[in-house]
Image: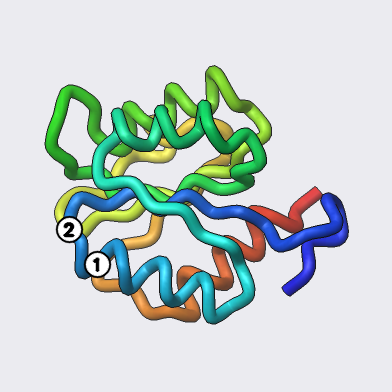
């Protein structure tokens, strides 16, 4: 899927501490035509964002090790990189609308591949 706004494939940052789930999410997005980079923690994700300013969507789990969870990460990303779209996922708790910044979206685990790709598409191509 070409990103007509930037002329290339959109770059998605997948943040998930469980390697198998992270790999599966990355595969889903890559098979849909996106370029993907991965991080295992919020701290790793912030470093990745500093290094890769072309990231267009943050796809993050809520529950992760470290000082920041996925909601905290989404809040920081919104503050520092307001053009990055936000998609949050969890198999544990569903955040309230107020907890998700900038019109971000939530997808409950276990998710279906089409749920993920449809939501990422909506986030990328909404006006």
Q: How is the image coloured?
A: rainbow
Residue at screen point 85% across, 57% down: 7
Q: Is residue 30 left or right of residue 112?
A: right
**Crowd band around label 2 with a 10 angstrom C-alpha radius: few (<14), some (14–19), many (20+):** few
Decide: is 42 above or below 22. above
Decide: is 110 above or below 16. below
Decide: is 11 above or below 97. below
Q: Is residue 23 left or right of residue 64?
A: right
Image disc number at residue 18:
2
Whole-percent x, y for residue 82 in the image:
63, 27
Residue at screen point 63% across, 74% down: 33
Among the 4 quarters of the image, the one containing residue 72: top left
Q: Is residue 92 left or right of residue 120?
A: left
**Crowd band around label 1 with a 10 angstrom C-alpha radius: few (<14), some (14–19), many (20+):** some
Residue at screen point 30% across, 38% down: 70
Residue at screen point 73% across, 74% down: 1
Whole-percent x, y for residue 20 in the image:
20, 69
- The Cα–Cα distance between marks 2 and 1, rounded to whole angstroms, is 6 Å
Q: Secondary structure at mark 2?
A: loop
Decide: is 64 above or below 117. above
Whole-percent x, y for residue 6 in the image:
83, 51
Residue found at the very far top of the displayed protein:
79
Report the residue marked by disc 1. Answer: 21
Viewer-closest of 50 and 66: 50
- Mark 2 and mark 1 residues within 8 Å of each other at the beta carbon: yes
Q: Judge whether residue 53 can be spotted in this image.
A: yes
Among the 4 quarters of the image, the one containing residue 113: bottom left
Q: Secondary structure at mark 1?
A: helix
């Amino acid at each position: 899927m070409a990103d007509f706004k930037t002329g290339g494939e959109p770059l998605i940052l997948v943040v998930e501490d469980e390697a198998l789930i992270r790999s599966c999410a990355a595969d889903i997005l890559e098979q849909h035509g996106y370029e993907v980079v991965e991080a295992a923690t919020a701290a790793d994700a912030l470093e990745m964002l500093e290094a890769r300013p072309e990231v267009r969507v943050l796809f993050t789990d809520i529950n992760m090790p470290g000082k920041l969870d996925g909601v905290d990460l989404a809040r920081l990303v919104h503050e520092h990189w307001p053009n990055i779209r936000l998609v949050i996922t969890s198999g544990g708790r569903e955040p309230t609308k107020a907890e998700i910044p900038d019109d971000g979206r939530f997808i409950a685990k276990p998710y279906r591949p089409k749920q993920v790709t449809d939501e990422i598409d909506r986030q990328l191509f909404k006006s």
